[in-house]
Structures are given as C-alpha cells and as structure tokens.
Amino acid sequence: MEALIRCTAFVFNFNTEEYSNSVASEGKEPEMSSDQASLPSKTEDRTTTAVHEEDEEKQIGGEDSKSHEAAGKGTWKHAAFHVATTIATPAAYAPLPFALASLGWPLGVSSLVAATLATWYSSLLVTSLWRWNGKKHVTYRLLAQSIFGFWGYWSIAFFQQVASLGNNIAIQIAAGSSLKAVYKHYHKDGTLTLQHFIIFFGAFELFVSQLPDIHSLRWVNGLCTLSTIGFAGTAIGVTIYNGKKIDRESVSYGLQGSSSAKRFAAFNALGAIAFSFGDAMLPEIQYTVREPAVKNMYKGASTAYGVIVLTYWQLAFSGYWAFGSEVQPYILASLTVPKWTIVMANIFAVIQISGCYQIYCRPTYAYFEERMLSNRTNSFPFRGHFVRLIFTAIYIVLVTLVAAAMPFFVDFVSICGAIGFTPLDFVFPALAFLKAGKMPKNRELRLSMQLLNIAIAAWFSVVAVLGCIGAIRFVVEDVKTYKFFHDM
C-alpha cells in the first residue's frame, strides 16, 4: 500500500508539473533519464523518423489524428463524465454483490479494494503516456504501437474489440432486463419478452450512433453520470431496505456448491470484478480534452474514481449483506419492495447504460469509417452519413442478435472482464510505463515503482486466465440448461 501511494504521488507530480510543462512548450519533449537511453524512440532519432512513423501508423491502423475533429475541446469535467460513464455503469455495479458472494467476505472485499486502487493507478499511467515521445497518441492502438510496435497495435486492437463487443452485449442484456422489469410492473400479464426489449434498446442505440464522435456525447454522458449517482443511491437504499425486511437469521454467507463449483465461481467472480473497472478508452477520451490534456485528464479520471468509490463499494457491500449467497447476478432482480423505487432504479440503469454503449462502440465505428472514407474523391452528398448508418446498423444488429440469443448476463461480464478489460486496464498500462514512462531518479522509489508495476501485470495476467476459465465453464453450463432466445 505504501509503495502504491508513493508511486501514485510520483505519477501525479509527473502529470501536473513536468509533463504538462513539456507539452505546452512548442516542440519541446520531456527530458529522459539515462536509464531510458535504449527506449524505442530515442531523442536523437525523433526528427528523422517522424514522417516515417506517421506513414507507418496510417499503413498499420489506417488512423490519422487529423481525422479527430473534436480534439481538445473538452474540460476536465467532460473527461470525468466520459470516464464515469464508461466505468460506473449499472452493468458494472450489478454483479459486484454476486462476485463478493462467490468469493466470500475476506477475499471479496480485498479483491474489490485492490481492483479499485490498481485501475486508478493504471489510469494515471496511461494518462502520463499521452505524449511520452513528443507526439500525441489519439487512440489506445496508436499508443501501444508507439511503445511496442506492430504487435502492440494489433494486440490492443484485439483486446479493445473483445472489450467493446463483450461490454455492449452485457449491457444490452442488462438494459433489456431493466426495461422488462418496468414493463412487468405496469403490465403483469404482458406478453413481451426480454428479447423484445433488447431489440427496442438496440434500435434506440442505432439512432444515437449517428452522432459524430465522443465529444458530441458530452451532454448525454453528463446525464448518464447523474443517472449513475441516481441508480447507485436508489439501489443502495432499496437494497438496505429489503435487507432489513428479511429475517437476518435466514441469510447465509457461506460459499455454495461442491469444491469444484466454488472454485469455478471464484474464478468467474474475478472476471466480473475486472469487468466492473473496465475502461478501454482513456486515450480516445483524453484526445477530446483541451490542454493541458494530462492535467485535465488526471482531474477528470480522479473525479470519476471518486464517484466509483462512493457507489461501487456501498452497493457491493450492502447487496451481499442483504441477500448473502442468494444474491442474484443482476442485483435489481433480488429486490422486491417498494415497487416504485425498483422501477426508478431500472429507469436510471437504462439511461446510464445508453451512454456507456456509445462510448464503447466508437472505436469500431471510427476504424471502419476511416477505411471506407479515406482516399475517396467525388463522393456523393451525405456519403459519410450513409456509411455511418450502414456500419452502425451492422454492428448493432450483430450485438443485438447475440444478446437476444444468449442472454446470460454474468457470463458475458466475466468473459469481457477477463479477456478484454484485464489486459487493457491492468497489464498493458503497467508494462507500457515500464518501457516508455519517465521513471523517478530516486533509486528506492524507482525500484518500488518497477516492482509494483511488475506485480500488477503478473497478478492480473493470472486473473485474466482464471476469469476466462470460470466464465467459459459457466457459458457451457448455461447453454446446456437454457435454449437459445430464452426469456430470462
């Protein structure tokens, strides 16, 4: 813990003082220590290789920073909205009590606290690498390419797509479940199924997907952040209320099932916790923030994590306290009274989820649009809008189809957390900063930072493997139990 505090303090000072000043100066780059003489982009090579690197980036990724029209317009408050929207979603909150129930109090609480601190620290590392070699890296893929080369680009592209697709499948299931709960409150004998509401939500997202970029979503995400607080406050209050209504002696906190079942449930829970802190979009968000981008992004991310601590932990602890080992994977499904507050919590959930969905589909949209629209002349009017409509429709139809066919919420949460978010939010930031970051000159602090980063990367690599094993096992079991398009 002491090492984490010291390393975080160093990154904070690096971000807000040295790094911001270096970015503000025209063409001036951060001074690098002698320990980094062997880094990929040496100071003496940058001028001669700048054009080559730009051409290579376009060849590998088809991405050009000039195409990001909304660059540098947002404030740190907008950054906080975006980060909070991508992390603090009802789909992320909802499985936390279930994860604690699968791990038990000691391991569950320690895992939750460790994940919170590790991802906050990792967000600072990614923020500090924004212009580590004197050049802006406007996407996660380009940042990875600048540090690790060709394989860095495509590795991050793969993990981002897994995170994006898995996240949007999971939250579309969650949105459908919440919409169905509201519907059933007013129409107890209604015939609409979960699949209908998943489709309705997909149609709405197709409409919102026509907005041009992340910055254009700032007011949507502002509303979503307020809905996050509303959801958390309502869900926590109603959970405690329900917990007091239950005979406390009937609530069990013991792990359920055989030794094998407990083991796989614990693996699955680790993946769910990793999903809950998923944010694979930090460089993309940072590019929408005005200078000093590093300092503003630091303030925005830290504010977002403040919201997370005030909400995640309370809902996780109160949900597990109220229902024990019987808590449902989607916490709202465990609530029974009062009905109107449950309806309100579900409405908050749908509003918040709608913004998160948009943040995570944007890299996919940008990737295909840039390929379709680059190097084309004499295009017909509104061609860009037509291309956007086609690709957003294809994407949303595919996500909606999978969500409707296999509405296994916690399974997708765990797979997405293990394969997508764990590499992006824990492993890559630690390794990238070791290779490209400006390490402290103090020998003791430098050693502490190196050991901490290696420990985070190693431990969460193990978590990714275990979470994937647990998630796949549960998917197999659910496929055996339920038929496709089952009305959960």
Image (tube, rainbow, N blue to C red):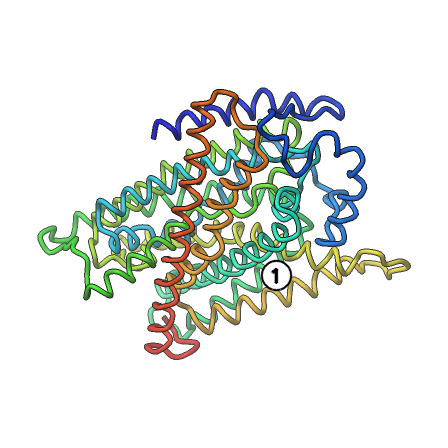
Q: Taking 435 as reference, is 338 above or below it? A: below
How many numbered callouts? 1
- Front residue of this view, candidates 171 and 258: 258
For the N terminus, the quadrant is top left
Q: Is residue 482 left or right of residue 239?
A: right
The residue shown at (51%, 59%) is 168
Question: What residue do we see at 43% from left, 56% from top?
Answer: 418
In the displayed structure image, the side of residue 132 where residue 453 appears, left or right: left
In the picture provided, is 415 more to the left or to the right than 82? left
Q: Identify the residue at image location x=8%, y=52%.
A: 249
Residue type highlighted by circle 1: Leu
Specify whether residue 182 is in view. Answer: yes
Q: Is residue 86 visible?
A: no
- What quarter of the picture does the C terminus occupy? bottom left
For residue 270, above or below residue 29: below
Q: Residue at x 67, y 40 (%)?
A: 137
**Percent x, y of residue 73:** 68, 34
